[in-house]
Image (spheres, rainbow, N blue to C red):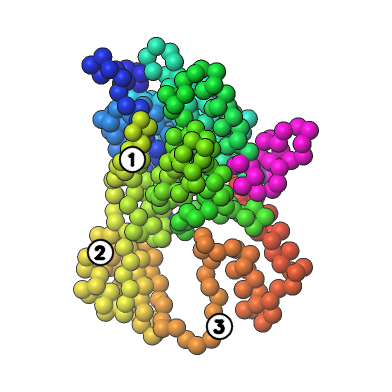
């Protein structure tokens, strides 16, 4: 059944519904465990939700693959999932910072009807038009690919103006302005007013969002955040975000048309122990009423952490988690013999085994994490080793090395 047929129920027009998802990271592993089977199960679940829920459009907001050159199995899995989803709804996909926009977008013009790959920065103000019966566009999806500042600052500048500032805020603001102008122009020309629904898609770290350990750092020039007000463009009914793996609401300041809904859908599976307490889901949005339903994703195996002395861990404390993917932290003052083997015998799905004795007096280096600037961590390490904080010249060298490594990682 074509997607457009789903709108007609007993001679009436049904509600406009979208399903927002992101950060599939097809091909990713969890501490060496192959997750492809579990990712396939999630995509089966997604097809069932779309089929049963009368969904008009599926929006996939970036990081579809886990790396720029995905394994063949991941490509086949995506191809099959898109084909099945497109039998029931339009599908709009954009690349994230893990994807290669060129590789993901190759052959976009050859895709079957109803499948829309948006990978070009130049298309920021050219929405995907999703039509109801009769031919009029009733849903406009402004699908922005991940905007790397080094590439987008020139592409989004308006000649003869110089390139934009080298920041995520500058390029995202420019792209959103273009989308908002186009939306206003279309509504003015068509006289449809608020009858036309409009959604923006973006892949970015919005300031105030709660990060996890499994998101790749996207700092450029030491800055990675986009202020929430950048997304509060006039006229958008919903902003579908990708990048952060925890499902969450983004609070937008009121715009000229009132506050839009903005959410991160989050990843469908946990990709680090920092996601231990997250409830994975997809976002089902009724654009006519503003209603939001979080549809829980299937859980292949729970994540858990067990901490304590080895006797406690192997005893009652660990009993509820024998079948889980578990991180075991053993706190005995002296490392127990055969620690790894004894833990694995008790927990066959243990992914991390750490000996963490009681803290001793002395200086320590705080571990890196998503909330910490890598340059700051590197500086602390230099000070820990040498006893002196890095000089300005040394800090500049460290920053250049970090940015070179990050750029090489993005282009791999």
Q: Are marks 3 and 1 in contact (CB under 8 Å)?
A: no
Residue 116 coordinates in the image, percent (x, y): 48, 26
Comparing 104 with 351, the one in front is: 104
- Residue segment shown in magenta: 150-173
Q: Is residue 170 magenta?
A: yes
Residue indicated by mark 2: 321
Comparing 95 with 343, the one in front is: 95
| Disc marking residue 363 | 3
Residue indicated by mark 1: 292
Picture quarter with the N terminus: top left
Q: Is residue 264 magenta?
A: no
- The label nearer to you, 2 versus 3, is 3
Residue 89 in view (yes/no): yes
- Looking at the image, residue 357 lies above or below residue 179: below
Q: Are marks 2 and 3 in contact (CB under 8 Å)?
A: no
Judging from the image, what secondary structure is the residue with disc 3 in?
loop
Residue 341 in view (yes/no): no
Q: Quadrant of residue 340?
A: bottom left
Q: Quadrant of residue 308?
A: bottom left
Residue 395 coordinates in the image, percent (x, y): 71, 67
Residue 42 coordinates in the image, percent (x, y): 33, 41
- Looking at the image, residue 263 lies above or below residue 125: below
Is 387 displayed left or right of 18 in the figure?
A: right
Residue depicted at 62% across the width and 79% down the height: 384
Residue 130 coordinates in the image, percent (x, y): 44, 22
Residue depicted at 69% across the width and 80% down the height: 388
Question: Mark 3 or 1 closer to N-term?
Answer: 1
């Amino acid at each position: 059944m074509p997607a457009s047929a789903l709108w007609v129920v007993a001679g009436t027009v049904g509600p406009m519904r979208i399903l927002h998802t992101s950060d599939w990271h097809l091909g990713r592993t969890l501490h060496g465990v192959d997750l492809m089977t579990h990712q396939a199960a999630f995509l089966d679940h997604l097809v069932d939700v779309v089929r049963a829920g009368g969904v008009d459009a599926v929006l996939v907001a970036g990081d579809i693959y886990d790396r720029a050159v995905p394994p063949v199995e991941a490509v086949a899995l995506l191809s099959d999932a898109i084909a099945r989803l497109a039998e029931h709804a339009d599908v709009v996909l954009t690349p994230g910072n893990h994807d290669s926009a060129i590789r993901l977008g190759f052959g976009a013009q050859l895709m079957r009807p109803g499948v829309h790959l948006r990978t070009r920065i130049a298309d920021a103000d050219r929405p995907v038009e999703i039509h109801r019966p009769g031919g009029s566009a009733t849903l406009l999806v402004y699908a922005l690919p991940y905007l790397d500042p080094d590439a987008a600052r020139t592409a989004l500048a308006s000649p003869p103006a110089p390139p934009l500032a080298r920041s995520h805020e500058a390029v995202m603001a420019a792209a959103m302005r273009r989308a908002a102008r186009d939306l206003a122009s279309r509504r003015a020309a068509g006289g449809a007013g608020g009858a036309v629904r409009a959604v923006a898609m973006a892949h970015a770290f919005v300031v105030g969002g709660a990060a996890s350990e499994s998101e790749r750092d996207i700092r450029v020039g030491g800055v990675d955040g986009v202020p929430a007000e950048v997304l509060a463009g006039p006229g958008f009914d919903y902003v579908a975000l990708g990048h952060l793996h925890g499902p969450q609401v983004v609070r937008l300041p009121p715009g000229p048309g009132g506050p839009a809904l903005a959410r991160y859908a989050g990843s469908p599976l946990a990709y680090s122990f920092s996601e231990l307490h997250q409830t994975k889901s997809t976002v089902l949005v009724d654009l006519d009423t503003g209603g939001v339903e979080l549809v829980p994703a299937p859980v292949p195996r729970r994540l858990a952490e067990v901490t304590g002395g080895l006797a406690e861990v192997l005893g009652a404390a660990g009993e509820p988690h024998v079948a889980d993917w578990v991180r075991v932290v053993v706190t005995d003052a002296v490392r127990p013999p055969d620690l790894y083997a004894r833990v694995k015998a008790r927990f066959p799905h243990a992914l991390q085994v750490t000996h963490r004795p009681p803290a001793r007096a002395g200086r320590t280096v705080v571990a890196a994490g998503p909330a910490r600037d890598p340059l700051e961590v590197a500086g602390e390490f230099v000070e820990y080793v040498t006893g002196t904080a890095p000089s300005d010249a040394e800090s500049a060298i460290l920053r250049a090395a970090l940015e070179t490594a990050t750029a090489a990682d993005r282009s791999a």
